[in-house]
Amino acid sequence: MLRLKRDTETGRVTVASSGAVPIAQESSSQVAAPPSAPASGSSPALAPSPSSSAVKVAESPVAGRSRLWKVLIPAAVVLVAALIVGGVLYYRSRSSKQLTEKDSIVLADFNNSTGDAVFDDALKQALAVELGQSPFLNVLSDRRVSETLRMMGRPTNERITVDVGRELCLRTGSKALLGGTISGLGSHYLIDVNAVACSGGETLAKEQVEAASKEDVLKALSRAASSLRAKLGESLPSVQRFDVPIEATTSSLEALKNYSMGIKVGREKGDAPSIPFLKRAIELDPNFPMAYAALSISYENLGQPSLGLEYATKAYALRDRVSEREKLRLTADYFRATGEVEKEAQTYELWIANYPRDSVPHNNLGANYAFMGQYEKGLAEAQETLRLEPNDVINNANLGEVYLYLNRLDEAKATFDQALARKLDGGYLRLYLHYLGFLWGDSAQMKQQVAWGAGKPGDEDLLLSTQSDSDAYYGRLAKARDFSRRAVDSAVRSDSKETAALWEANAALREAEFGDGASAKQDVTAALALAPGRDVKVFTAIALARSGEADRAKLLVKELEKNYGSNTVLKLYWLPTVNAAIELNKGNSSQALVFLEAAAPYELGSPPPLQLGTLYPAYLRGQAYLLAHNGTAAAAEFQKLLDHRGIVVNFVTGALARLQLARAYATAGDTAKAKSAYQDFFSQWKDAEPDIPILKEAKAEYAKLQ
């Protein structure tokens, strides 16, 4: 809010409001004074009635005085009226330039005339953090600035000067441009911060502070930011409540500069190139919570959740040093890294309550709903996220993703097309375009996405592994193996060993489901040798259980339970799945069904680490019913996978659902439906390698039905 009403630090009324109440009080006393002390010869009858005007009061029978009051009183009244009207008009003219809570502010780069490069980027970052803790001021995000610069045909890393900032203002519908300068003043430093209206360029608020030394610059900037927030209309209680100075987070300008560079590089070039800057920041200041948090997110985005958890834990331990908004962010990131979905969701709800215009908590809360299979709730959050931040590629991709889950493919396509038309692009958007092409049987679109990812670290391996699943879905196992190998190699080249291990574990799981236990065990060994992280252990445990290696699978389950006991997704989805697979391997269908009860509420979900749902609980429950010779119940479970193709997409369980459905019909004694389902599976696998074990089994089973 931009309301130039009161200087909350001093309590003084500013020019914007001094033309109203003080003048009105003064004019009232001037009008009332003359009749309260009449001349000695005046008649009491001349005293004004309550309805008399000030002009009538002046009509005294004393000639000399009457002329004087006839002149002076009307003139005073006119002057007072003019002052009142002028003050009101001035106040209104100032008020018309004020901002509302819905308006946004563009931050320009600081003009550094000191010659000391340490101030470059660092001061803008510090000011962004200072203003960002306000629930009222809405600072345009760096991501949106970059996307808008791209649409303007400018480099996304262009310096935001006054001219560029004003154009950004107009393009984004923002109302104010806020920039600053720092200059040397002998051994001191002078800092000016100025907010101007985007349209007319008039000054809305400004602040000037002096720092006695370089070490005091951040402290001085914090003072300026607090005062500026007050001048821009934020209430004193709000400023006091949400006012953690930047030097409490870090007092090191060098650390802040490296942090700022890490954020900037990450936005422009990806997570991997940002990591050296962020690591340097915590070398310079080992108690810099925001740098730890940024490292956590970078590693999680690169598919290395173990490192993500390590840095999230360090950031969380330092959360009392940051602003309220950053504290919410660190807390949510920590619970996300530990997998405590309920606590994470509660944090997002609190975040939304305090900062309703932030898109991040809406986006992440929507992702939580998707994890749990509550896609309608996830859709509402994704739509709200896009409303708040329409020019963010991730927000567009996430909305399209939810439409895929809901089998609303036309709306998913429209969302993706709209993002591309706005020149918004990225790996996850391309991933979902691949999924859409897969669901529509458009092989050209799928190949296009894989080609787009070539040479892009973090994107290339994701799309290669996705293509491996798509080929495996149709039984083209040789191609699937080749794409998996390329995905692993690409991730290793990008120094993302944990991601590489996950692709290896995914391949192991596929081999196990196709009946090649020997290949599955080899891939498991390779995956654990690369990086035995949490997600890798989950997938390798399932692969081992499905390959008949129950004892090794149990050891991994014990490790996961011991080290990640609070992880909601593990407790309610993955560990019940692994334990059920172990029991099925032993022929114990009843105990397998008991384990799967915990996962039943979430079986339609899409829990991490994958970007799709596996419906593994339903798939294994169907197999448990087959083992118990309950074909009808088994068929109902396998049908779930066919009914929710937008969730399962190209995962291995979806590839084999038709075969399992055929087996269920055969068990139930419905030979006609069984034959039809077998034929559907053979048609799907018409290009499959003939020596795949499960295909050979299917052909033998079908022959017995003839």
Image (spheres, grey):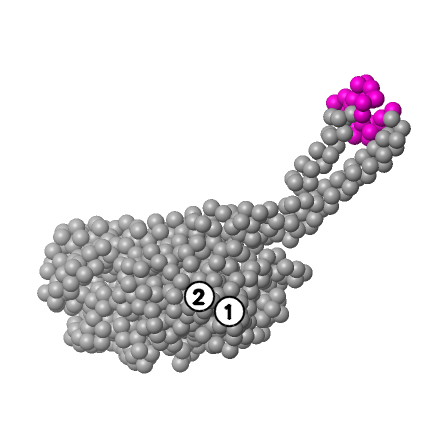
Quadrant housing residue 331: bottom left
Quadrant housing residue 618: bottom left
Other residues around mark 2 within 10 Å, as few (<14) / some (14–19) / many (≥20): some
Residue 127 % position (x, y):
48, 63
Q: Is residue 620 visible?
A: no
Q: Are marks 2 and 1 in contact (CB under 8 Å)?
A: yes
Query: Nearest the camera: 629 or 31?
Result: 31
Q: Is residue 26 magenta?
A: no
Location of residue 657 with respect to 456 vertically, above or below: above
At a point 77% along the width and 21% down the height, the residue shown is 49
Query: Nearest the camera: 138 or 661?
Result: 138
Dot 2: what SS? helix
Quadrant housing residue 64: top right
Amino acid at the residue labelled 2? Asp
**Distance from label 2 to label 1 (Cα)?**
9 Å
Q: Is residue 353 visible?
A: yes
Amino acid at the residue labelled 1? Tyr
At a point 12% along the width and 67% down the height, the residue shown is 552
Q: Is residue 54 magenta?
A: yes
Residue 378 left/right relative to 338: right
Residue interval drawn in magenta: 39-61
Residue at numbered disc 2: 216
At a point 40% along the width and 62% down the height, the residue shown is 247
Residue 290 % position (x, y):
37, 64
Residue at numbered disc 1: 189
Dot 1: what SS? strand
Other residues around mark 1 within 10 Å, as few (<14) / some (14–19) / many (≥20): some
Residue 686 % position (x, y):
31, 73
Location of residue 587 with respect to 703 vertically, above or below: above
